[in-house]
Image (tube, rainbow, N blue to C red):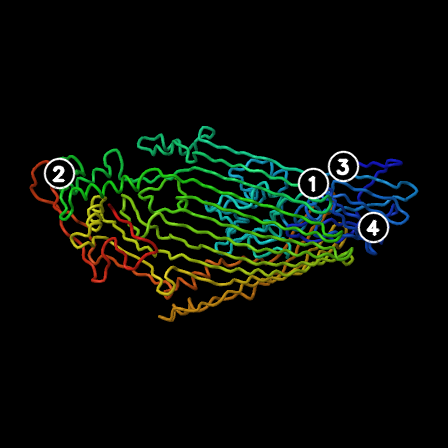
Amino acid sequence: MNQLHASKRRLALAACLLSVAPLPAQNAALGSIAGIVRDASGAVVPNATVTVTNSGTGASRTLTTDTDGHYTATFLQPGTYQVVLSGTGYGKIDQRNVTVTVGSTNTVDATLPNASVSTDVVVTTDNILIDTDKTQSSQTIGQQLVSNLPVNGRRWDNFVLLTPNVAPDGNSGLIAYRGISGIYNTNLVDGANNQQAFFSEARGRSVGAPYVYPLDAIQEFESSVSSYSAELGQSAGGVVNAITKSGTNAFHGDLFEYFRTPGFNALDPLNKYQGQLPGGNRLLLTQPVKVQHQFGASVGGPVRKDKLFFHVTYDGYRRSNPITYLSTYNTGTTSIQQLAGLCDQRSSGFVTRGTAAAPVIYPSVIPGISPAQCTAAVNFISSTQLGAFNRNTTQDIYFPRLDWQATAKTHLSASFLFEDLKIPNGYNSSTTVPNGGVSQNGGINFHQRYLTANAETALTSRSANVVHFQWSRDLETAGTNSGGPAISLTNLFAYGETSALPRGAFPDEHRWQITDIYSTVRGRHSLKTGVDVNLIHEQIQNLFQGDGSFTYNTGTAEFNFSNWVQDVYQVNGGRHYNSFTQVTDPITGSGRDDFWNKNLDIFVEDNWKVTSTLLLSLGARYDVQLVPQPDRPNTSSIVANEYTSTINTDFGMGAPRFGFSWNPHEGTVLRGGYGLFFGLTSNSTFYTIRRENGVYQQQYNVNATTNPNSPYVAIANAPTGQPNRLFQQSGSYVPFAPQGGIPAFTPPGPAPSIK
């Protein structure tokens, strides 16, 4: 309940239920205050003076009510405000602690007392429990929640899950609104698009950086589920609209330290149960994260009181979570070390499989393989590829922001985000990898640089304009622990370069964006229109399967090892694999592409306060994605040409929006809406059409014409305890098939070797 304090006498004030004020729509990174001014008799007061002051920075804006007593202050920085309302022949209303949150409008109506009764009435406003003038389904996550609720990893946008109709998008790490895929959301920070266009995820990605914007830099954000403003678009799902912290006239800051070790954490109950089962994986009984260390500081304050302010955040992230490579062949009865018995020319202790009644005893000789070579091959698997390997994350983020109240009508702000991330062995994020090898991993590196600037200008007492600008670079690379090719032995292990690496740029994304939005109030109508130009320069360098991949997948692990070891040393023909595949790029050599994606949109919106209890939101927007057409389509067939010659530009993304908010009686609000919502196509899709088309990138496949399924055949009447299998050559290939372990084309990196 409002608390009223009068300088001469205590007055009881109530909000006039018959007031009819236009309400502005949602604003990216900003908020609004609006209302209507009346006198004690209930008549509207035209030309009343309304002064809106930011309590933290002292920034002030003076407005004049129109002929219907309406006023609107748009494009306000979120924070706490003081609203002073007065008029000639009337007393003054001083309404304090008026909260403005991102994307919202706070209604502040007033009834001015007669000057002879009182000249000063102070109203302290509590937070609104039900917003009667909001047509969209949304929720604001304020600074108190962001700063105090626990969140594993300190990723601020995880708080979006507090919004109704929002849930994790499976195990992808993304967030789904209303069941729609997480790649169709939009993420805004300080009015600038915070999406990566290549993968259609918030920058930093769900499986990449722990986060990009530090938690201590986020003031608050709005999570919009449906029926949101025409200003917000390029999303078929939801919109996250965040604003970062700014400095004020008071110095404020904090230090934080979060330290996590296995001793402070309980084991996952399911993992613990499975690890304790007979034959269970004992690694499940250990914590995957050995150390997680997050630390940093933020400080903000005035450079010049009421004029210039700063806020600086540093965030450090360190984590150690080793990755373990296992072989399912290592059990209580079999082990990789035993495979040396297939070729070390021993005279006893032969490799024996099968049952006691029907044993399978392998010979210890493979022609052309010496005992030393045999031992080296086994040691290569167990000593260099399997085991636990360090994976230490290092991330540093610096985020300074400046705010300048240039004039009474103009507010300027600028920020710059600097983030570097390094994770050796970070490409594969799994805790354990069965039948793999550490050489099939690689280090990932993120290099993020974002410059954002904003200018809000009050043009008149009824109109305002805001400009958002950003320049950014989002560079993600991934190295490789080994060059090509990739070698896979089913049920044993794998090594060599994994097919997705290296990634010289995946992506290297430069963005120039400028947005201009104009807002004005005309009677009961709050009108807004804007245009957005978002130019994205996409540079890609990744040749998927460019390493060349050999697969050994015969009937048993012993068969696979025997065939593989012959190819390692190129004996007995040197071709014993089952299949080989490789992609080559005869034009760029490394899967490179370079193109501009131009995302353009325009919108118009009218928020019409029909009555004191009914608000209508009417709007429309238009989006278009312009991407250059493929320069070298595949003309080898009608079908190939059809799907590689043209990128179909959707010129039909016209999106009408309608919403309403009806307040039939106090404490009840009914909201509804209709609209068309379009998600943008990922730039990775355009890359696929432009480059993975059989011209730039061509796939080369070879299979054994007679698979080498049986390098061993049974021997009849073999002496007891002696080998009852005989080594034989098997498998045949076309003449142009590559030698085992030697790719057909030079991969992007040196081929591994066994020494």
Q: Secondary structure at mark 2?
A: loop
**Where does the image place residue 373, in percent across and percent down from the top left?**
19, 44
Q: Where residue 307 appears, x then y in whole percent?
A: 72, 47
- Closer to the chain start, of discs 1 and 3, is 3
The kind of residue on which mark 2 rests is Arg
Question: How far is the residue under mark 4 from the one under mark 1?
Answer: 28 Å
Of labels 3 and 2, earlier in sequence is 3
Instruction: State the SS at label 1.
Output: loop
Which structural element holds mark 3?
A: loop
Q: Which residue is mark 1?
A: 129
Alpha carbons under labels 4 and 2: distance apart: 101 Å
Inter-mark Cα distance, 3 to 4:
25 Å
Q: Residue 1's mark?
A: 3
The amino acid type of the residue labelled 1 equals: Leu
Q: Amino acid at mark 3?
A: Met
Position of residue 571 relative to residue 125, above or below, is below
Q: Which comes sooner in the sequence, label 4 or label 2?
A: 4
Question: Could you tell me if residue 240 is visible in this image?
Answer: yes
Give left or right: position of 561 versus 621.
left
